[in-house]
Amino acid sequence: MQGGGRNQERKDKPVILGVGVDLVEVNRMQALLNRRYAARFIERVFSPEERAVCEAATRPAQCYAARFAAKEAVAKAFGTGFSSGVSPGMISVTGGERNRPQIHLSQKAREYAETRNVSAIHVSLTHTATSACAVVVVETSGSS
């Protein structure tokens, strides 16, 4: 590419920082929900809003699986996985069965996003009877 004009134009536009995809088997989530310490797991990993939406769902395991996939996909899009002090409980997926899902970050996850100038996080969830999938695209401001 020639010239500096293109790079100058790009500075003010969002840039993709990362893309994350994750797939969770619904039967594995169901097995987790059937375990002795399921309540502890759910409370540690899912926000009160996530729990309310999933418990009201026709198939709670499917709902939890989709949200867990989204948390993993965010961590992958950040390029960190669940490290740097970021855990699944710091990433929340809001929106119900019929509402557009959105990602909300708290604590270290929010701090990490701020250091990377994250300007938007886009998420798409889908599921079948056996699998739940999430795709996440993280944008950063072009002036990072």
Image: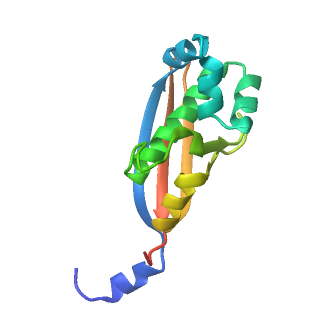
Query: Which sits in the foreground, 87 or 17?
Result: 87
Residue at position x 66%, y 30% from top?
Answer: 43
- Snapshot quadrant of residue 37: top right
Residue at position x 61%, y 18% from top?
Answer: 38
Q: How is the image coloured?
A: rainbow
- Snapshot quadrant of residue 35: top right
Query: Which sits in the foreground, 3 or 32?
Result: 32
Image location of residue 61, percent across then percent down: 61, 20
Residue at position x 38%, y 86% from top?
Answer: 8
Image location of residue 29, percent across then percent down: 54, 19
Above or below residue 90? Residue 16 is: below
Above or below residue 131? Residue 141 is: below
Q: Quadrant of the C terminus?
A: bottom left
Number of numbered markers: 0
Image location of residue 60, percent across then percent down: 67, 21
Above or below residue 80? Residue 112 is: below
Above or below residue 88? Residue 4 is: below
Q: Is residue 55 left or right of residue 89?
A: right
Q: Is residue 9 left or right of residue 37?
A: left
Residue at position x 56%, y 37% from top?
Answer: 125
Q: Is residue 92 left or right of residue 133?
A: right
Q: Quadrant of the N terminus?
A: bottom left
